[in-house]
Image (cartoon, rainbow, N blue to C red):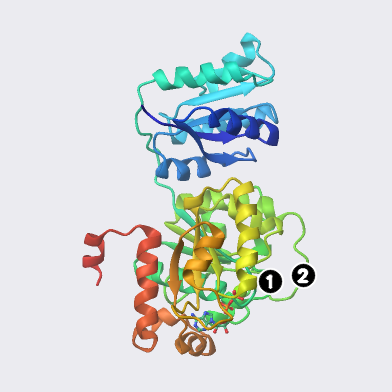
Amino acid sequence: MSTISLLVASTDEHFREMVRESLLNMPNAKVAAEYPEITLNLYVRVLQDLERQPEAALFLDLAGDPETSLKALEKIKQAAPDLYVIAANYAGDAESVIHAVRSGANDFIQLPLRRADFRDAITRLERVPRRAVTGGSRLGRVYTFLGVKGGAGTTTLATNFAGVLAQRKQNTVLLDLDWSANDVAMQIGAGAPQHSIWDLTEAIGRMDQALFEGLAMRDPLGFLYLGPPDTLMPQGYYLGPMLREASTFLVEKYDSVVIDAGRDVNNELVQTALQVSTTVFLVMTQEYPAIRNAQRYMALLAQLGFTVDQVKILLNNYTKKPGQNLATLEQIQQTLGQQVFYGIPPSPAVLAAINRGRPFIEDRQAAGDLDRIFRAFVDKATGRKKEDLAKSA
Ligand SMILES: Nc1ncnc2c1ncn2[C@@H]1O[C@H](COP(=O)(O)OP(=O)(O)O)[C@@H](O)[C@H]1O
Ligand SMILES: [Mg+2]
């Protein structure tokens, strides 16, 4: 029996819940991803998810904003012409259905969603010869580092991650979205850069690569950096939409976008970053408060539509045999119900590098074991194959 994976896009929580519940009764079907927002660059997330689930189909609820949803659908089909799409809407007249089909829908369900109609649509989907969907364009990846508490090492890991990717000749952008500090700039010795993410808001509506590169700073390691203004100022409400727009060309023009999201998960900028992320690294330590917070963050990420394999737990300052005030790896995995993706050991090289104002991966000898372990983590995170490793020892 073949399995059915659905990507479910709807601004309506009840819609998504009903799909989830209906699928519970179909043992061979599951929801692979949920998108609570339908915007023109939804195709970015869809393509990212198709990379993991090439046989998935999309169930798209047009009802929230039919016009935007149909445009979003057109872009999705341009990017992935073979993707099977079931559209749904209250309006079920011939004109509405034809419009949906012309925009790329393969099937149509009239709302309100009835279980029987949904089951029938799934049966029709099952009959379609399945083929793996490949995206038309190869999109860059967005790696977001989110700390479950301050001082967990989020900035350190994000900065060095971008550094390793740049050393591997990946076209990389490093964004610092932690508005309360300017720590990435400090860790890469950038001083107080002239431009900030804030400057991007002035270009909203006409943003492109040239404009971005005019504002970003080129680090000696090769990545481009842009961060918060050095003077503390309120974020304003343009920043979420701005990042959404920026992410569209960033993933088209660059191999990797690395984001230091800090730890303020209720912030709109950070939530937007999460929505466009391929992978979220949840940075935590073995301290009990960090574990408690990690649980809360994981619940939120699940609510935002992230699946377990998109959220990866990073255990920083990891020691195998912690004292009695710290949890063991096993305890953490048991409490969180998920494997830890990687453990990064404590090393005096980290603070030395911060004081030097350069990422620790720049001085491989000084960082020793930490450097080796960190690069192995980057390999695992980027899915680098063994033969590639041989090429760039
Ligand atoms: N693996 C590590 N080994 C030793 N010290 C570390 C390690 N990771 C982080 N630190 C230290 O923890 C402090 C906070 O790191 P930072 O990256 O700024 O965390 P966050 O961004 O989560 O607040 C820094 O002073 C850094 O030196
Ligand atoms: Mg930080």
Q: Nearer the viewer, residue 221 or 390?
A: 390
Q: Nearer the viewer, residue 145 or 232?
A: 145
Where in the figure is residue 42, as x and y percent of width and height?
A: 56, 40
What residue lies at 77% left-to-right and 59% top-to-bottom? Answer: 236
Q: CA distance from mark 1 to mark 2?
A: 8 Å
Where, by quadrant of the figure, is residue 128 drawn?
top left
State whether residue 234 is above or below residue 107. below
Amino acid at pointer 2: Met
Q: Residue furthest front?
A: 324
Q: Secondary structure at mark 2?
A: loop
- For the C terminus, the image quarter is bottom left
Q: Mark 1 touching mark 2, by CB under 8 A?
A: yes
State whether residue 331 is above or below residue 183. above
Q: Nearer the viewer, residue 125 or 212?
A: 125
Where in the figure is residue 199, as x and y percent of width and height?
A: 67, 63
Numbered circle sitting on residue 229:
1
Where, by quadrant of the figure, is residue 284 drawn?
bottom right
State whether residue 66 is above or below residue 107. below
Ligand 1 positioned in quadrant: bottom right
Report which residue position mark 2 lands on.
233
Where, by quadrant of the figure, is residue 111 drawn?
top right
What residue lies at 47% left-to-right and 18% top-to-bottom? Answer: 123
State whether residue 77 is above or below residue 37. above
Where in the figure is residue 348, as x and y percent of width and height?
A: 47, 89
Amino acid at pointer 1: Pro
